Image (cartoon, grey):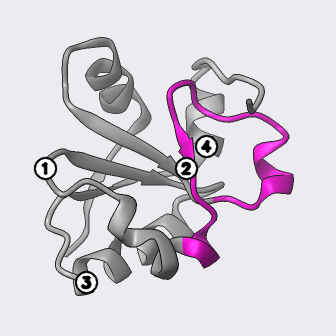
Amino acid sequence: MVREIDSDALKQRLDGAGELLLVDIRTPEEVAQGMIPTATHLPMHLLPLRQAELPRDKDLVIYCRSGARSYHACQFLMQQGFTNTINLRGGIIDWARQGLQLKAPA
């Protein structure tokens, strides 16, 4: 079962000292519209090739546009032995709807 977090709870964790890595799995075109500050961009299609770069000792909060692709990405990572994946329920759409900060990609 995939663990999930909502935008408000994620914002609180980001504001606190919680150890987590925020991973944006959207396409470069989607990311160009803005991303959550502190997020790392790793397009979903590259996850199988670059999963070894992801830490296993801190929570990985995965997000996409709506939460559907990131849910599947969490499932994939769990099949690869990751026990630290969390899906952002509602994705960046919900994050923006809550009025939370977005930044331009680097």
The mark found on residue 90 in the picture is none
Q: CA distance from mark 4 to mark 3?
A: 25 Å
Q: Position of residue 103 (x, y in %)?
A: 70, 22
The answer to whether mark 4 and mark 2 are in CB contact below 8 A is yes
Q: CA distance from mark 3 to mark 2?
A: 23 Å
The residue indicated by pointer 3 is 80
The mark found on residue 92 in the picture is 4
At label 3, the amino acid type is Gln
Write down the quadrant of residue 9 in the picture.
Answer: top left
The mark found on residue 57 in the picture is 1
Residue at 34 percent across and 22 percent down: it is 14
Mark whose residue sits in front, 1 or 2: 1
The residue indicated by pointer 2 is 91
The answer to whether mark 3 and mark 2 are in CB contact below 8 A is no
Ranked by sequence position, the earlier of labels 1 and 4 is 1
At label 1, the amino acid type is Asp
